[in-house]
Image: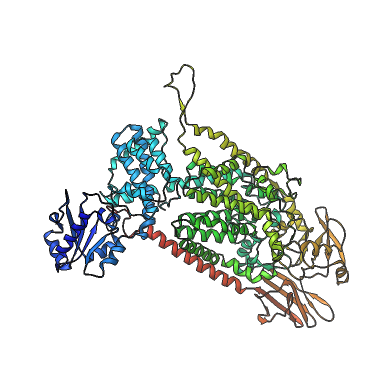
């Protein structure tokens, strides 16, 4: 501020300070901001009383000239008269240029204590408008870039000039909002943009280049520099819908009402522009998103077409398929007998159906496909859908990275055929495929939330997190948890506080736990009774240096060797996506710029963390003080969540290559002049390696997605059918018999499973491939159960077995005294006739003496019993046991646990809270209180 400015302000103060009509004098403009030249004018606001303001409003005398007090050359002093209510209104809803006018305002005098706090509030950036403004600004850019394509093609100088200004204006306003800086006015706009600390390198140079020489090449460079700088928030309704909404709302303000003819001209010209070979920017709308998702689903269906055979007797060739689907019978049982399905009565003496850590029975995809097509055929369809979901998760990551259509689709199609998904079916591991897809979706949602910090992403993360929790296996869920340190790249960001996004992550976690309550509550209730084989030495883990090689070495090449430190189980290590994706991923670390660097380092850090966990190095450190980590035997599976990160990095590099302004290639043709030679865009040359990068993994994926007809298995298993509910044993360790037996309604024991009980029920029938009874000595060591050893077996009554037939060529033996339910008296053992299914067992017992009734179902809280319609208390025991008086009596046992009711209640609460938040969010989008881009906003 110059001395003559100070003298002029002093004269203004002397003139108005003692006038009772005026309460304060505010000096604004360049003089107040310290940017004044020697000849700058004095701008001021004169705060009047309410009465004076109303009187002047009536006469229209709301401006005042005081040029006489500005006695320096070309000096002027002029101001506007307002009242305190004007300041109060401005503090809540003033447009940005008006707020900017009060920046660093000087209070020459004030008789009101309200003036100073109001001035400070007016000059603050309106944080509550920021997110929606950024969505509006970012929606303008692709639309105006499409106009630039049209202007460049049609050589329209007016459209070129106007569109260049619009691109710079809205690109600059987007950056000002990103930096929480007020938009001043068009005069001060570039000066304010220069002060923005966080902006793309050389942006102002690119803006000047575009304004000086408007053309599509300069516009594309400016656009790419801006769009690659950060993951800008996108409007839910789509860019074009938001553009039209803001245009219609703002009239002739910052966004002028564009003539309808201009929009129609663009539509009519698209065909001509395409025929001329000029690329047209495709607007991001819902129709395009649905088209891309549809293409991903079609690709998944083609890759997994062998599984779209709805014959239940056609199985995948993987050896574990027969035991992977045990929990899916929940939905068949639910249709047959309702709540009896809460008890899985087909395995090893029974277990709670909803507390199964291994199964995927509560995932909606399993429920839907099982109800529609049955267990086996439905699971095959679910595998194909899971492949598509894995591709959609990768497509989602690409959208968060703000990548173009080609990069998004290529990454998604590659994820569908990646070894981390399709390769798991080499051994028939349905649960691994579904949990990998579900956890990939949760990873994409968490990435979305960290970048956009929107409530929409919070709710999506809650839903995807809950689906991941119920998708089974637990390996991939642990891997998802292992990503946690990488999120610091997104949370601890300069100029963005960490607490709001941290709160959103906690909200998503809380909602996810509530939504998964119907699974988590029973699981926690029965947690002490769940066990699995352990491996404190982690023999399955590869050395850390070898794990990345699984990305580029096809599993067939090293499946049967230990060269890379692998066990002979290829499905554990299959991560194959090919060299092209890996090379592109490595290049991303060098080409990322601006805010995208944080996203790239987030993905890279997550991939390294997964490699580190898969090597079991941190688990070995923990195993000494925390022995339970030895339960994580197959650590190579944790690397499955590396692949979405690697493909995400590769797609980023691909997108940069596609958007780079490569010079056009002129094809050398004989007889053609230089100007007449056809031109080729160099990016078309990428088609060959990109197609090869998809085809090779697709070929390998289809080798894991083959099928075999197992109808003979279903025909043979009939040999184990019993007249009552007796337990039967297929050949132990031959997993394929499990699904066929459960489909027939058999009760199978012993088989390998996760629940830990004192023992398992002895079978009434047993198929033995390698020797005559007694053979149950194998139960304990192989199933990690105490079991029944050879000496105990010899001492048991009825241990004598007799051959009764064959299971194909496998002899079947009967243990005649191994009843499902019987009354033991001092004189004899009286078997009972048993019917029912799952958690509903009905018995008719005839015994001449009183005794003890024992039912070979594991007893747990939730079981109740009646005798002749009268409630009877169960005795404490591993099996269902109660007193049995002499005579003929009817007993009914029902399993109705409290944990399922509590868990269902929590799931209902979580569902209502999530829907409530989603409806509020949608309502705020469809019915905004006011247009975000108001005139001069």
**Image point (62%, 40%), residue name:** 579
Q: In the rendered image of this protein, does residue 305 appear above or below residue 342? A: above
Measured from the top left, where is residue 530 in percent x and y?
A: 69, 67
Measured from the top left, where is residue 893 in percent x and y?
A: 68, 75
Q: Determine the image quadrant of residue 411.
A: top right
Left or right of 206 in this view: 315 = right
Q: In the rendered image of this protein, does residue 586 appear above or below residue 331? A: above
**Quadrant location of the N terminus?**
bottom left
**Quadrant location of the C terminus?**
bottom left
Q: Would you say residue 409 is visible in this rendering? A: no
Left or right of 156 in this view: 579 = right
Measured from the top left, where is residue 489 in percent x and y?
A: 52, 55
Number of marks present in the image shown? 0
Visual colour scheme? rainbow
In this view, the residue farthest toward the top is: 671
Left or right of 790 in this view: 444 = left
Which residue is nearer to you in this view: 588 or 117?
A: 117
In this view, the residue farthest toward the left is: 59
Measured from the top left, where is residue 778 in percent x and y?
A: 82, 62
Q: Would you say residue 712 is visible in this rendering? A: yes
**Image point (50%, 51%), residue name:** 598
Which residue is nearer to you in this view: 127 or 7?
A: 7
Q: Determine the image quadrant of residue 412.
A: top right
Left or right of 324 in this view: 804 = right
Which residue is nearer to you in this view: 636 or 845?
A: 636
Which residue is nearer to you in this view: 294 or 598?
A: 598
């Amino acid at each position: 501020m110059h001395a003559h400015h100070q003298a002029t302000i002093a004269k203004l103060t002397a003139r108005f300070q003692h006038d009772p009509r005026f309460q304060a004098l505010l000096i604004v403009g360049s003089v107040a901001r310290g940017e004044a030249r020697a000849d700058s004018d004095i701008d001021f606001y004169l705060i009047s009383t309410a009465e004076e303001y109303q009187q002047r409003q009536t006469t229209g005398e709301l401006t005042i000239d005081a040029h006489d007090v500005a006695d320096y050359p070309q000096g002027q002093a002029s101001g506007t008269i307002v009242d305190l209510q004007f300041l109060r209104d401005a503090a809540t809803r003033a447009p940005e240029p008006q707020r900017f006018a009060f920046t660093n305002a000087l209070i020459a005098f004030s008789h009101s204590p309200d003036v100073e706090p109001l001035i400070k509030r007016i000059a603050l950036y309106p944080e509550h408008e920021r997110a929606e403004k950024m969505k509006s600004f970012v929606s303008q850019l692709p639309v105006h870039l499409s106009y630039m394509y049209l202007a460049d093609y049609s050589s329209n100088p007016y459209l070129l000039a106007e569109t260049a200004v619009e691109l710079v204006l809205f690109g600059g306003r987007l950056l000002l909002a990103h930096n929480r800086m007020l938009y001043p006015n068009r005069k001060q706009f570039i000066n304010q943009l220069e002060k923005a600390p966080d902006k793309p390198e050389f942006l102002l140079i690119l803006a000047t280049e575009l304004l000086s020489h408007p053309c599509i090449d300069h516009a594309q460079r400016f656009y790419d520099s801006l769009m690659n700088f950060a993951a800008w928030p996108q409007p839910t309704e789509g860019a074009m819908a938001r553009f039209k909404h803001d245009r219609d709302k703002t009239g002739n303000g910052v966004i002028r009402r564009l003539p309808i003819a201009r929009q129609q001209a663009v539509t009519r010209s698209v065909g001509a522009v395409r025929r001329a070979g000029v690329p047209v920017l495709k607007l991001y709308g819902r129709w395009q998103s649905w088209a891309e998702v549809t293409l991903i689903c079609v690709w998944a269906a083609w890759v997994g077409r062998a599984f779209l055979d709805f014959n239940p007797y056609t199985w995948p060739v993987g050896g574990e398929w027969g035991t992977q689907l045990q929990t899916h019978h929940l939905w068949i049982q639910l249709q047959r007998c309702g709540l009896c399905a809460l008890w899985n009565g087909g395995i090893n003496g029974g277990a709670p159906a909803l507390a199964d850590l291994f199964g995927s029975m509560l995932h909606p995809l399993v429920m839907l496909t099982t109800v529609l097509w049955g267990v086996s055929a439905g699971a095959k369809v679910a595998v194909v859908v899971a492949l598509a979901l894995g591709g959609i998760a990768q497509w989602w990551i690409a959208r968060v990275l703000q990548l173009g259509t080609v990069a998004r689709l290529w990454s998604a199609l590659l994820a569908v055929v990646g070894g981390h998904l399709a390769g798991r079916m080499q051994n028939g591991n349905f649960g691994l495929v579904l949990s990998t897809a579900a956890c990939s979706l949760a990873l994409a949602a968490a990435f979305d939330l960290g970048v956009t910090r929107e409530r929409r992403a919070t709710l999506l993360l809650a839903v995807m997190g809950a689906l991941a929790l119920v998708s089974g296996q637990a390996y991939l869920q642990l891997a998802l948890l292992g990503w946690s340190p990488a999120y610091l790249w997104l949370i601890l960001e300069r100029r963005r506080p960490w607490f709001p996004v941290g709160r959103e992550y906690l909200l998503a976690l809380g909602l996810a736990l509530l939504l998964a309550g119907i699974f988590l509550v029973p699981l926690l209730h029965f947690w002490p009774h769940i066990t699995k084989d352990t491996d404190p030495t982690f023999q399955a883990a590869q050395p850390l240096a070898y794990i990345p090689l699984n990305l580029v070495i096809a599993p067939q090449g090293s499946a049967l060797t230990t060269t890379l430190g692998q066990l002979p189980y290829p499905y554990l290590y299959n991560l194959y996506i090919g060299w092209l994706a890996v090379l592109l991923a490595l290049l991303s670390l060098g080409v990322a710029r601006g805010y995208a660097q944080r996203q790239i380092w987030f993905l890279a850090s997550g991939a390294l963390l997964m490699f580190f966990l898969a090597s079991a190095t941190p688990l070995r450190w923990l195993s000494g003080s925390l022995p339970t980590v030895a339960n994580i035997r197959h650590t190579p599976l944790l690397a499955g969540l590396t692949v979405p990160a690697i493909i995400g990095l590769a797609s980023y590099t691909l997108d940069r290559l596609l958007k780079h302004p490569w010079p056009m290639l002129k094809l050398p043709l004989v007889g053609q002049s230089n100007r007449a030679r056809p031109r080729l865009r160099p990016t078309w040359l990428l088609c060959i390696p990109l197609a090869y990068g998809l085809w090779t993994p697709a070929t390998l994926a289809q080798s894991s997605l083959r099928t075999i007809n197992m109808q003979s298995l279903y025909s043979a298993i009939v040999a184990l059918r019993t007249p009552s509910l007796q337990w039967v044993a297929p050949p132990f360790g031959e997993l394929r018999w499990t699904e066929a037996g459960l489909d027939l309604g058999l009760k199978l024991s012993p088989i390998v499973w996760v629940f830990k009980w004192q023992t398992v029920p002895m079978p009434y029938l047993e198929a033995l491939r390698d020797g005559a009874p007694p053979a149950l000595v194998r139960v304990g060591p192989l199933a990690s159960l105490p079991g029944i050893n050879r000496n105990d077996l010899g001492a048991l009554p009825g241990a004598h077995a007799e051959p009764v037939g064959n299971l194909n060529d496998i002899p079947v033996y009967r243990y005649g005294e191994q009843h499902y339910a019987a009354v033991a008296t001092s004189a004899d053992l009286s078997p009972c006739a048993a019917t029912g299914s799952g958690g509903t067992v009905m018995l008719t017992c005839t015994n001449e003496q009183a005794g003890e009734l024992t039912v070979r179902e594991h007893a747990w809280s939730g079981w109740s019993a009646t005798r002749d319609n009268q409630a009877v208390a169960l005795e404490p025991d591993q099996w269902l046991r109660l007193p049995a008086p002499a005579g003929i009596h009817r007993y009914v046992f029902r399993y109705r646990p409290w944990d399922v009711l509590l868990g269902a209640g929590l799931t209902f609460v979580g569902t209502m809270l999530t829907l409530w938040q989603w409806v509020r969010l949608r309502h705020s989008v469809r019915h905004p209180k006011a247009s975000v881009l108001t005139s001069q906003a």
